[in-house]
Image: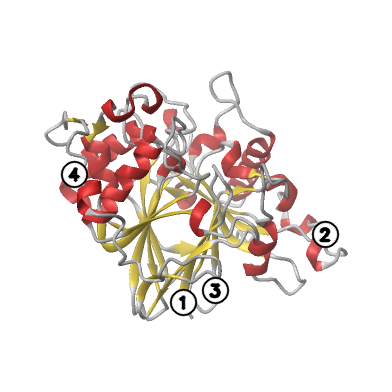
Amino acid sequence: MATTLSFFPVANGDMTLIQLGDANRSTLLVDCHFREPSSDPDNPIPDVLTPLRDRLPRDEKGRPYVDVFLLSHPDQDHCRGLATHFYLGPPDKYPDDAKPEAKKRILIKEIWSSPIAFRRASATHVLCEDAKAFCTEAKRRVAFNRARSFVGVGPGNQVLILGEDVDGKTDDLGPILVRVDDGFSKIGGVPNPCFSAILLAPLPPPHFEGDSTSKNDSSVVLNMTLASDPAQEQVRRFLTGGDAEVLVWEALWVHNARRAQRLQYDLLLAPHHCSWHSLSHDSWSELRDEAEVSEDARNALSQMRRGGAIVSSSAKILDDDCDPPCYGAKREYEGIAHEASGTFYSTAEDADTETGEPLEFRISGYGLRRLGSSRSSRPKSLLRPAASATALAFPNRPVRPNKTAGFA
């Protein structure tokens, strides 16, 4: 038994499946982005639903399920297809039992969400239909928990709210609320020997001025500690942050500069699909190599432990003005990886964009290793240098200085 992480090729979107090495082989799905498959040579779109379902367990009725679905934030490229391929509603009213297994929608035992799920759609907080469906389901589960005083809530009704909302909106949710800087290790209310995490964001005011309703800035940032097996023979860290942009990473560095170990990782999902806006306040398309990198944001994102990896879940990264994914951000992440003898990967190049098979890593007795692919010539070891030191030095790249000496 080992813990695996699978990054599906969903272009500029996120879909990461974590299969833990515990006895139940617990599953956590972080975001989803299901597009209509297409064999159009000018715009091929792989089927990622089939390889995902192939990796999911089934219950006694043959229904596929995930133990946890974490929505980092309610943008379409993080929840597209949710209402189509997952069952959202009371578990005792699941309607697909008479259907063949291939047609049964995926059950979600427990939902994890930021409190942005409680905010109404507005001109500045526009929700797609899948996001609306998710928010409705999250609210249903919270109401169900409240009605039962948070006791005896079973799979299909479980929910965790990650972060506090403004104006005391989440103050009464104690048993299902995780506050920033809190650690937790339960899945479905039960401690899991292969999982623990610390919630780093969304940061509430006064870290940001006013009540920010930006979906990106409300992204859940989690640093997960994942063990290879219940005996914890090998333990590695996975940092994921949705579409958190530069303000968030700056605030996280200021907040954690004296305890930087909270930001250390072995595997990083590059935020916002390798966007320059997670590293800089400047426009890459306008300034290119003259764009300044925020020192605070880079510090937060560069806490890689030796031999780690960074994954860009994005379209192919080209030397052009696109953002995301951004060529300048890719160079910066390659530099971060090189500093720690690590490796930069992209789902557009290292997953199978024809079959939809993901880029996968395994945490086992050998540590963190990339699983081989029939289409890739890259070695499995993560110790391959990202590029030469000369190519990654960027001596002329401007850096916006750290403007804060510490934090309260």
Residue 171 in picture, x, y percent from top left:
44, 39
Question: What residue appears at the point 74 percent right and 47 percent down from the top-left corner?
Answer: 84
Q: In which quarter of the image is the C terminus?
A: top left
- Contact (Cβ within 8 Å) of mark 4 with mark 3: no
Q: How many badges with numbers are in the image?
A: 4
Residue beneath disc 3: 25
Q: Distance between the residues labelled 2 and 1?
A: 32 Å
Q: In this view, does 68 lie above or below 315?
A: below
Q: In this view, does 358 lie above or below 217?
A: below
Which residue is at the front of the view, 139 or 131?
131
Q: How far apart are marks 4 and 1 (CA)?
A: 33 Å
Q: Nearer the viewer, mark 2 or mark 1?
A: 1
Which residue is at the front of the view, 269 or 21?
269
Q: Which amino acid does label 2 sit on?
A: Asp
Q: Distance between the residues labelled 4 and 2?
A: 50 Å
Question: What residue appears at the point 49 percent right and 81 percent down from the top-left corner?
Answer: 1
Q: Quadrant of residue 399?
A: top left
| First along the sequence among labels 2 and 1 | 1
Q: Quadrant of residue 332?
A: top left
Residue beneath disc 1: 2
Q: Which amino acid does label 3 sit on?
A: Arg
| First along the sequence among labels 3 and 1 | 1
Specify the label residue 96 is tagged with.
2
Question: What residue appears at the point 46 percent right and 77 percent down from the top-left corner?
Answer: 2
Q: Is residue 189 visible?
A: no
Specify the label residue 266 is tagged with.
none
Question: What residue appears at the point 42 percent right and 78 percent down from the top-left corner?
Answer: 229
